[in-house]
Image (cartoon, rainbow, N blue to C red):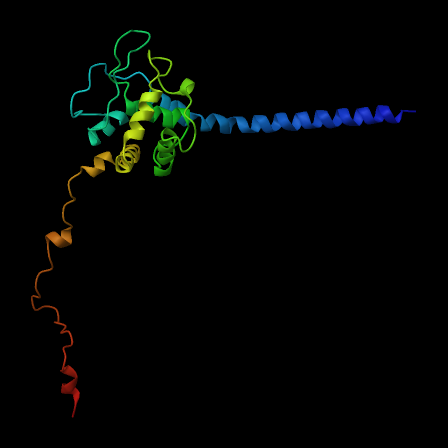
Amino acid sequence: MIQPKVISRRVVGFAIALLTTASLVSLFALMPALKFNAQPQRQWSAQWSGQPAIAQQMPEGLPGATEPWQQVYQLIPELPLENHYINARTGEASPNNTLVSRLIRYHLYTKSRPPNYRLDWKLTMADYLGANDWIRAELYPSGDTLTVNPMEGDVAVIRSLNRAQRDALVNAMVTIFSGQASAATDPEPPASSEEANPTPPNSGNSPIILQPRPGDAQLLLP
């Protein structure tokens, strides 16, 4: 005869095995979704990597700017570059490691926020103002590749901007990442065919419909 304690241990063991199997099945079911969600992050990383494509000092006006941070400076040329920091590995200046490039990387990678929504950029501005999340120096973009961590300098610059300037920076980010930068500079569309070719006057082939005028009702009186 099987003792009650033995039966109890067998029941508990069976329950644990069943829960373990269910957990593994759920984990394998979620793996394709996790792989799909991580794809945009890898795509962003390849497109906006920390290493700039050009190495010379940015020319004034940034003609032909293609990177988002370059387009921001093209829209707001008075925004400080903050690109005076030295690369710790090469000992040379990094002119393309700018305030805006680090701001974008902080927004996209450190906080994993989408780039085309105004509210998310407002949250990032709030981080720099100390009104939302704390910015951690050890996780700040380029903090481990430059001789001086640029976090404090970047925070000081953002806090020195007034509200209108911060709003302009947010608007520039949303405009660029929403693909509206080129549309903002497109010429006005040509006039429609109806405006270009107005309806010609009546040629006599169709009846002329007269609109009623004040006093016409008097003509119907006997």
Residue 61 vertical placement versus 174 (above, below) = above
Q: Residue furthest right?
A: 1
| Foreground pick, 212 / 125 | 125
Query: In percent of the image, x 37 and y 33: which residue is there?
Result: 126
| Foreground pick, 199 / 204 | 199
Query: In percent of the image, x 15 and y 74: which residue is there?
Result: 211
Determine if residue 200 is in view: yes
The image quadrant that residue 105 belongs to is top left
Tell me: 34 left or right of 95. right
| Foreground pick, 164 / 169 | 164
Q: Residue furthest bottom?
A: 222
Q: Indicate the position of residue 18 as horizontal and vertical percent values.
A: 70, 27
The image quadrant that residue 79 belongs to is top left
Task: Give the position of the C terminus as an image quadrant.
Answer: bottom left
Task: Give the position of the N terminus as an image quadrant.
Answer: top right
Residue 96 vertical placement versus 168 (above, below) = above
Q: Indicate the position of residue 206 as horizontal and vertical percent values.
A: 12, 69
Q: Indicate the position of residue 212 as horizontal and vertical percent values.
A: 16, 76
Tell me: 61 left or right of 120. left
Q: Indicate the position of residue 12 as horizontal and vertical percent values.
A: 77, 26
Determine if residue 48 is in view: no
The image quadrant that residue 178 belongs to is top left
Tell me: 98 left or right of 6. left
Q: Residue furthest top?
A: 90
| Foreground pick, 6 / 87 | 87
Residue 153 vertical placement versus 116 (above, below) = above
